[in-house]
Image (cartoon, rainbow, N blue to C red):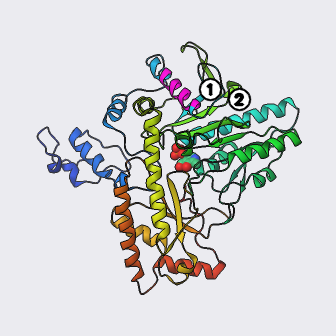
Amino acid sequence: MNRNKEEKETTVTTTVFGSEEMLHSAPVDSIPQHPTTPEIAYRMVKDETYAQTQPRLNLATFVTTYMDEYATKLMNDAIAINYIDETEYPRVAVMCAKCLNIVANLWNTPEKGKWKTGAIGIGSSEACMLGGVAAWQRWKQRRIEQGKPHDKPNFVISSAYQVVWEKFAQLWQIEMRTVPLSKDKLTLCPEDAIALCDENTICVVPIMGVTWTGLNDDVEALDAALDEYNNRTGHEIPIHIDAASGGFILPFLEPQKRWDFRLKWVLSISTSGHKYGLVYPGLGWVVWRDKKYLPGTMSFSVNYLGAEIAQVGLNFSRPAAQILGQYYQFIRLGFEGYKAIQHNSMEVAKYLHSQIGKMHPFKNYSTEVHNPLFIWEIKQEYAKQCKWTLYDLQDKLKQNGWMVPAYTMPANIEDTIVMRIVVRQGFSRDMADQLLTDIQSAVAELEKLQYPTPSRIAIESKIKVKGSVFTHTGKGK
Ligand SMILES: Cc1ncc(COP(=O)(O)O)c(C=O)c1O
């Protein structure tokens, strides 16, 4: 795009594909010397962002890929609004507080005030960080008051944590103590979690909608175990729930289940508005049980909402469009609308789970489906004689446009290769049938192989060397 003298100038009559720009690579290192027409710039950027797969055939992501046209229009209209400019757009801040109220009430907050205590995030990652930092600050303050050292904080989580918790540990230098999963313990074992707790534990983090498996940790059992432990030791170890996916599933599909603020030690919960909250990315929410659990050091007070409202966040500027999108979805869908959508996603996920579980090479990781996602593996007896792996199936499905990821499980069960399907709004039973047909055809083709595939050879040689398959790649995250 840095034209030589002899190269032709771009003028208003230049056509996009008749332009000099189309003969050069797009800029990589330096800003182009000259401007170009919007049509050419648009084409260059657009062509570089062609989706590699159809977003709705991407069964790897949890993030919303469909909103109706009114939601899309509202969000597009708000594209220039910076949430932090509250003096210009005070109603957006109120709308954000209303969304927080709605989310907090879905999670049965006991907080009585008009405005519930919480914060918006760019996703669950920011929301988890805020929940974690608050737990750390509360612990630190208590230790200072007790005249005790406060330089070795830790938190406890299952080894199936999402990568945000590794970031939290690294960035704030808080030791992460992980409870390994095993073939018998598919979710966080409360007793094992308690065994890792001590006076320096800032919180335990159960996950609702575990990224790797789709299962839920048993928060009710953990809460009971922590209650007994805290009473016995005098510690006050609380729970932060990472409900990135489950936070918008459980209130609608299992409202009786006690996993949220109905439990004594649950002091904060985070979720992704852009997952089952049904909003385009990026949007996250974190709610505290009460204002007193949000340390003053993290909160900046605003008073123009008719009350003192605590404002909290890692970022200063952030897009406001997602707030409009979330509030629209709450009004448009209501409780029953959300319930119907989550129900359908769940039914399609259960259908796929049962059909895949019946296919002769496969075995589901768990018998039940608690969120609209699940994983499966190749049966051991079948794996002994077959010439392919789930990575080969992933490649085959990709040829038909599907993105269905295969990955190794976390520490302690890292030899297990699984495949995951996340069902979201926009994925129908009919599409599920198409996928099943494609899986069956892919398996039939793979079964015709005479020689093992490279991934199969790689696994065999690893097994021979040390009984392990691939290293933990983080793909499951
Ligand atoms: C359990 C869990 N926590 C946190 C996250 C991070 O979420 P986000 O992508 O919204 O930052 C995810 C994402 O998949 C998740 O599954």
The label number, if any, that marks residue 104 in the structure image: none
Q: Is residue 329 left or right of residue 46?
A: right
Query: Residue at left 57%, top 64%?
Result: 365
Residue 342 image point, x, y percent: 46, 45
Q: Residue flagged by tag 1: what amino acid is it?
A: Thr
In the displayed image of the protein, which residue is found farthest to the front?
256
Cα–Cα span, label 2 and label 1: 9 Å
Q: Nearer the viewer, residue 107 or 127?
A: 107
Residue 416 image point, x, y percent: 59, 69
Query: Residue at left 55%, top 41%?
Result: 124
Q: Are marks 2 and 1 in contact (CB under 8 Å)?
A: yes
Q: Which residues are magenta?
A: 94-105
Does 260 lie within the magenta span? no
Name the residue tied to disc 1: 117
Q: Is residue 77 visible?
A: yes
Q: Is residue 25 left or right of residue 288?
A: left
Does 99 lie within the magenta span? yes
> Total label count?
2
Q: Is residue 18 left or right of residue 291?
A: left
Name the residue tied to disc 2: 293
Q: Is residue 422 visible?
A: no
Element carrying mark 1 = loop
Query: Residue at left 58%, top 39%?
Result: 255
